[in-house]
Every structure is written in C-alpha cells, then in structure tokens.
Image (cartoon, helix red, strand yellow):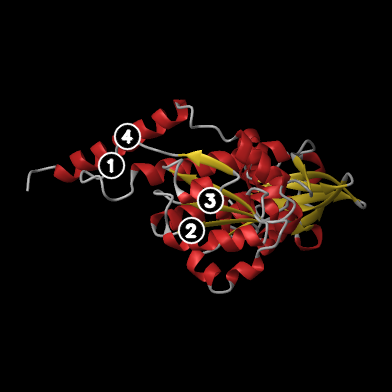
C-alpha cells in the first residue's frame, strides 16, 4: 500500500463532493420555491420517507425541519405499508427521497397515498421515474459522479441531497421568522439548551446566601464573611440598600498597604460603581459582559433591586460555555 494513500484518497473524495455541491447550487435544478411553498402552506405535519442511504438522509431532513419550526417525522416506507400510514392524515404531506425514483417500498405506497388524498412530493435523480411522476412537486438531484471510485456507493448524491434538505429547512426558518428563543423551546437539553434557556436568575447566588457586610464593618469583618461564603466578593450595604461591592482583589490591594484591617471601615474603601446584569438576561450574555468588562463577578438586579451575584466560576461549573 502506498504511503499516505488514505489522506490522498480521502481528500480526492472530499473535493469531488464539494464540486458536485457547487455544480448543483448553480444548476437550474436548484429550485426549492415550489416545494417550500407547499411545506409552508401545509396545515398538518411533514412526513419524510426513504430507503437505505436515502432513508438516513430523510431522517436527518425531518430532524432538521422539526428543530427549526416545521413539525416533521421520518417514516420508513416498509413500516408505513404495514400500518404506520395510519398516522398520516389528509392535512399532512409526504416527501419521498429516492436516488432512482423507483424504490419499491415507496412505489407500493403511492396508491394508498393517492387514496387518502395526501400531498406527495419527492427528490430523485430521475424526473421520469414512478415516484417523480406521482409527485405534486419534484426536485431533480443528479450528480455527474459519485465520490465512490466504482460509482456505486451513494456519496456525492447523498451529500447534495443532505445539503438541499438543510437549505430548505433554513429557507423555511427565515420565512417563519424563527428566532433563537423559538429554537430554545425545542432544545432544552445539553450545553446548547443551557445556552439558549438558562437565565441569570437560575444560576445566581441569591442575596440571602451571598456575602453581605455593612459599610460600617471593618476589613476584618469582611474577611470572615467572604471566607465563610467562599465567593470572592462581598456586597456592601447601608441600611437596607446595597451601595457597593468589595472583592478579593480589592482586599489584596488594601493589604499591600500594611494597614490595620480591624480599623479600616468598608465605607472608605468599597467600590461604589460596580457592574450589574438583569436577572432575566441569558447566562451566556452575562459571560460576554464579564469578558467585555474584564471582571469575574456581576451583581444581579431585578426591578433595580439587587437580588444576588453571578460569578464566572458558577457559569463554568454549569457547563454553559
């Protein structure tokens, strides 16, 4: 075996698929207007079907549509033939993906689809195929060559179809005005879900658990409080109002002056201008704010009232960024 054959052949296949993607994007066959219009006007759900490699592409297409505001499901044609077609109603639509356009399982479904008067669309490489001819709307995806050197394994064709599905999903997303807030509703789990849903109020240390000292207290009093709460910062209050903060950095700078910590009152050394964030802001926004201000802690406010603190340590522990 020649040295570096894996790298050479892999890159060759990659570039072939890239060329086919570019070629399809410039061809007259790249016309999604009609299919997108039908999908957008569909009053029910979108079911996408396919067999083999096309089935995997169909599954991904359905998942992408669902996550971007178009309720969609993958349905295997063989299962549909044996009862699952019953879940599809008149207001729904079916999109079939088939390289040849002659997948037997899908062709066998067509009479039942017509009988139930369900809108049927397809993506194939043969406009004269059984599936294409039975479709209300059809997109022709035909590549000059597969990345497979034997021109057998669907490679370039599945890549182009996959990208086409993504393109359709994004076009529909834009037309619906689908926002990051909408996206968050269907992605509540994992790191992505946290980025889109976790609010500052969900992660902050509430004021009743935060290190809070009086402006009349000494630096010695503050050290005990901060050490006990292990937060690296204290809120300084006068009567019932938070008037400033004092961080461990502030403390280090004071200690470098060889002062008597039991005689210095916080009122004379506190930081009155401190960085804040609203409790409704996303935690990722808080992290951006910390980076911008070059601080590791933000005071959290709600209706102009201090309700807690949020630290970068809390954000990192929550695995949000």
Residue drawn at x 62%, y 34% as measured from the top left: 33
**Mark nearer the viewer, 2 or 4:** 2
Residue 157 image position (x, y, % from top left): 38, 43
| Depth order, front residue of 300/164 | 164
Q: Which element carries disc 3, helix, strand or loop? A: helix
Q: Which element carries disc 2, helix, strand or loop? A: helix
Query: Label 1 vs label 2: CA separation?
Result: 28 Å
Q: Which element carries disc 4, helix, strand or loop? A: loop
Could you tell which of marks 1 and 2 lies nearer the N-terminus?
2
Observer able to see residue 299: yes
Q: Please give the residue where the numbered disc 4 appears in the rendered image.
A: 144
Residue drawn at x 45%, y 42% as measured from the top left: 128
**Mark nearer the viewer, 3 or 4:** 4
Q: What is the number of the mark on residue 61?
A: 3
Observer able to see residue 256: no
Q: What is the number of the mark on residue 147?
A: 1
Q: Residues within 10 Å of mark 3 (few under 14, many from 20)?
A: many
Q: Please give the residue where the numbered disc 2 appears in the rendered image.
A: 107
Query: Label 2 vs label 3: CA separation?
Result: 20 Å
Residue drawn at x 55%, y 58% as measured from the top left: 110
Tags 2 and 3 in contact by the CB under 8 Å rule?
Answer: no
């Amino acid at each position: 075996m020649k040295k570096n054959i894996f790298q050479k052949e892999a890159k060759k296949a990659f570039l072939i698929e890239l060329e086919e993607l570019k070629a399809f994007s410039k061809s007259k066959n790249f016309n999604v207007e009609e299919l997108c219009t039908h999908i957008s006007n569909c009053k029910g759900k979108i079911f996408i079907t396919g067999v083999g490699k096309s089935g995997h592409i169909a599954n991904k297409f359905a998942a992408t549509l669902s996550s971007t505001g178009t309720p969609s499901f993958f349905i295997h044609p063989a299962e549909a033939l044996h009862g699952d077609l019953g879940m599809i109603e008149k207001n729904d639509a079916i999109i079939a993906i088939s390289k040849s356009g002659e997948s037997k399982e899908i062709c066998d479904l067509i009479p039942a689809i017509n009988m139930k008067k369900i809108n049927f669309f397809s993506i194939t490489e043969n406009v004269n195929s059984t599936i294409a001819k039975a479709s209300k709307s059809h997109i022709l995806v035909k590549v000059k060559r597969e990345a497979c050197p034997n021109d057998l394994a669907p490679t370039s064709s599945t890549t182009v179809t996959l990208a086409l599905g993504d393109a359709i999903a994004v076009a529909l997303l834009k037309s619906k005005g689908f926002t990051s807030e909408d996206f968050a509703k269907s992605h509540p789990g994992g790191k992505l879900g946290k980025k889109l849903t976790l609010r500052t109020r969900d992660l902050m240390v509430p004021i009743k658990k935060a290190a809070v000292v009086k402006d009349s207290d000494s630096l010695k009093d503050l050290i005990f409080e901060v050490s006990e709460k292990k937060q690296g910062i204290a809120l300084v209050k006068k009567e019932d109002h938070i008037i400033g903060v004092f961080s461990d950095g502030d403390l280090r700078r004071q200690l470098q002056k060889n002062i008597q910590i039991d005689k210095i009152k916080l009122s004379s050394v506190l930081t009155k201008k401190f960085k804040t964030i609203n409790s409704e802001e996303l935690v990722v926004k808080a992290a951006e704010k910390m980076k911008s201000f070059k601080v590791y802690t933000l005071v959290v406010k709600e209706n102009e009232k201090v309700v807690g603190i949020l630290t970068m340590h809390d954000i990192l522990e929550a695995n949000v960024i």
